Structures are given as C-alpha cells and as structure tokens.
Amino acid sequence: MNKKGISLLLLSAMLFSVSGCGNTAKRADNNQSSEKKEEKNENKMTIADVDLNDPDLEEKWKKEPRYGTKITLGYNGGLCTSGLGIAHIKGFLAKQGLEGEIKNLQLSVADAIGTGKLDATTDHISTSVVPAVNGTNMVFTRGAHTGCKSLFVLKDSDIKKTSDLIGKEVAIHDGIGASDHNIALRFLSRDKVDYSKVKFKNVETAATIQAMQNGEIHAAMFSDQFAQKFVDQGVIRPIRSITTDDDFKIEPCCVLILNKKFVEENPITAAKLTKAHKEASDWIEENKKEAAQVINQNNWGSGNVESDQKFLETYNFKVTDERTAESLTDVLKDYAEFNLIKAESNSKETLAEIWRPMKK
C-alpha cells in the first residue's frame, strides 16, 4: 500500500475514534443527567415526609412557593363539611401559621380544585373519586366525617328494602356518576341487587317529594338534613343509610381535598392545613353544641342551632387515616365493578395517586 493509502486509513481511524469518544461522552452526560434528575426526585419532600415537630421546619417552609400566602378554602356552609369553616373561625389554621380565606363553593369540586381556583375543600368521596382517578388535579389528605345521606321512600310505600326497587325509578339530584347515584349503587351492590334493573332519574331536589307523591318516582336519595322535615311530617322514611346502617356508618363519606400541584409543590403547607383540619374536626366531635352555635353565628348551617346540633350528633368527625384508606380501597373496587372507572384503576397504585395522608 502506498503512503497516500496509509494516510487515509490513519485519518479514518482517528475520525472514528473521535466520533466514538464523542458519543460515549454524550451518553455519559445523559446518564449523569438522568441520575441527577432521579436523585432530585428521590430527595423531594412529600406531605408524608413532613415532620411538624422539626425544629428547622420554619426555614424549610420558607422555601415553598405558598409560604406566607393566603390559602383559599371552599365551603358551602353545610353542617357535614364544616371542618374547614371551624378551622378558620376557631383559630386552628392560625395555630399552624396559616391564613385562610373562605369562598362559597359555586363550581363543581373537580373544576374548582382541579383548576386551582381553590386550594382545598371538603366533599363526598362518591363525588370526588371518579374525577381524581381520571386525572383531575386533586388528591385527598384525610377523611372528614361519616354519614349524611340516605335512600328514602314514601311513609306508606310498599317498598321495604332495596330489592323492592327492581323495575322502579329512583331520584338522584346531581347527575349520573355523581354522589347520589354512586351511593345508591353501593347500597344495591351491598344488598346483592342487580343495579342494572333499577332506573335512575335526575330530578330537582325541590320537586322530588311531589314526584314521589305523584307516583313518578318510587324512591329518592336525600341528604339527611334536607329530608328531616319530611320525616318529621310523616311523609317519607329511610330504607338505607350511610349515616345509620351498620355496614356504612363507619365509613367516611367525605374527604379533605387539595389541589394536587399545591400539595406536591408545598408539602409543608399542605401538612399544616391537614393538621388544622384534623384539630378542627376533633374539636367539633367533642363540642357539638358549641360547633352548631359557631356555624350559625357565621350564617352557615340551617339557622336553627338546636336542629343543627342534632345533625352534628349523627356524624363522627374523628375518622382515622387507616379507616379512610380502607374505605377508598372499597370504593375503588366497587366503582370498577360499576364501570365508573377502568378495571385497572382498582389498584394500590391508583390509591397511592389519589390518597396523600400526612405523616403520623
């Protein structure tokens, strides 16, 4: 081979070597970048990591985007979701170094929390699980309380149990796939009744009693608070209840719901808010009479302190995280069966996505 050929071979080898080294170096840089990213994610604090007794917590808290800002809380004045209102009025938020602002919940929970218009609110598991599982930007950090809804029929109706509803119409008031419908489905499923043989009809709450009396509707889901007047008048009676029935009364019906991005970017703030809600809930459970007074003093509730106290007595505000996790697991299983969520969503991974309790 002549000198020219040898030179070309040497040049090609050098170029290949440089190119190879460059690719190797690039791959090494990418690997290091990925490792750093993974390490950063692993080191990121979550709400479950927050130690509220940490002596250095204040300095860590100052690094959060929402440190020192007002927390927007959605509350519609209802008795059963009064934990946030009480936390605000009785100083449990202030105790945690938080300033809250109560806003009346006008939008759906999914819209208000998912879009960040509200930082937190309290609402039914039966309303919130489906949008949370389907990707709405919200998570649950604790159970709120038990009870508050029942399935009613007319006082003189021949219907005695849920199996008597086959082929009949049940009124719901917030649409298919929402709270009333989903609770009714769980009643039927628990009683081994084929829910596909029961008809559901969305009816205005104010028109439902008349529809029942006209024979257009045979049963209806109501909040216990709304129904009590008609129960007292001897118009309707319950046949199934999440408030009083043994198989449901231990379950939390409502949860504390926070914007997911808010929780992930501000775990300390989220933990403090959850702690304030827990302390407020514990206070309500131990002070039902005073709680009813505070609620009415702030133009919440029904305006009747004695009646409101009576309803508060039917709810248990001391719901444990363990009980809430168990109930959410049961709900995911049921909702997968009802095709409200995909079958594969009935999993521990899904639970971990929507359930973010604080550290014990």
Image (cartoon, grey):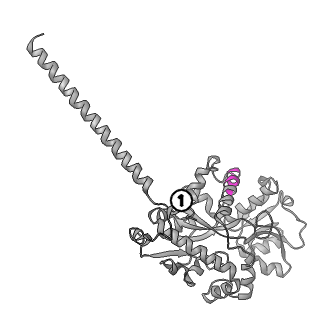
Above or below, comparing residue 305 to residue 112 in the picture: below
- Which residue is outermost to the top? 1
* Closer to the camera in the image, 21 or 256: 21
Above or below, comparing residue 228 to residue 182 in the picture: below
* Closer to the camera in the image, 144 or 148: 144
Task: Residue 311 in the image: state x and y as whole percent.
Answer: 74, 79
Q: Main secondary structure of the magenta part?
A: helix
- Image point (56%, 78%), residue name: 104
Residue on which the image places disc 1: 136
Residue 332 part of the magenta segment: yes
Residue type of the residue flagged with mark 1: Thr
- Which residue is outermost to the front? 55
- Image point (78%, 60%), residue name: 187
Magenta part of the chain: 331-338
- Left or right relative to 225: residue 357: left
- Left or right relative to 358: residue 78: right
Quarter of the figure with the N terminus: top left
Q: Residues within 10 Å of mark 1 (few under 14, many from 20)?
A: many
